[in-house]
Image (tube, rainbow, N blue to C red):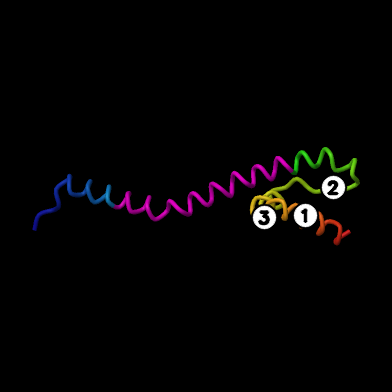
Amino acid sequence: MSPLPAHTLWGLAALLLCAGVLLLRKPFVWLLRLFLRSSAGLAGLALFSRIGPFLGVSLGVNPINAVVLGLLGLPGFGLLLMLQWALR
């Protein structure tokens, strides 16, 4: 019994790599989209932290609030404001 030739092993490795890319493409795109939306939410929170004191409202600029804004968008901003008001 002889071992497999080198080109066969490289072919199998390439096939496994292609299968892995195809299986993980959708979760990777979802995580990238969440990261980008959360980054935009963090920027929005930073802007609101500058304007908020003039309105008498403040929200913390932190990753949890950014992810809430990234997942829920503008309704998430309202949710954070209502939670901040309710927990005072």
Q: Quadrant of residue 2?
A: bottom left
Under mark 1, the amino acid is Gly
Question: x%, y% of residue 12?
Answer: 24, 51
Circle 3 sits in a helix, a strand or a loop, which is it? helix
Question: x%, y% of residue 5?
Answer: 14, 48
Q: Do the residues labelled 1 and 3 touch (CB within 8 Å)?
A: no
Identify the residue at image location x=69%, y=48%.
66
Q: CA separation, marks 2 and 1?
A: 12 Å
Question: x%, y% of residue 70?
Answer: 65, 50
Identify the residue at image location x=22%, y=48%.
11
**Residue 8 has which mark?**
none
Identify the residue at image location x=33%, y=53%.
19
Q: Earlier in the sequence, mark 1 or mark 3?
A: 3
Q: Earlier in the sequence, mark 2 or mark 1?
A: 2
Question: Which residue position holds label 3?
Answer: 72
Main SS category, magenta section: helix
Magenta segment boundaries in residue numbering: 16-44
- Extreme-bottom residue of the structure: 86
Task: From the viewer's side, name the closer residue of 13 and 22.
Answer: 22
Question: Which residue position holds label 1?
Answer: 78
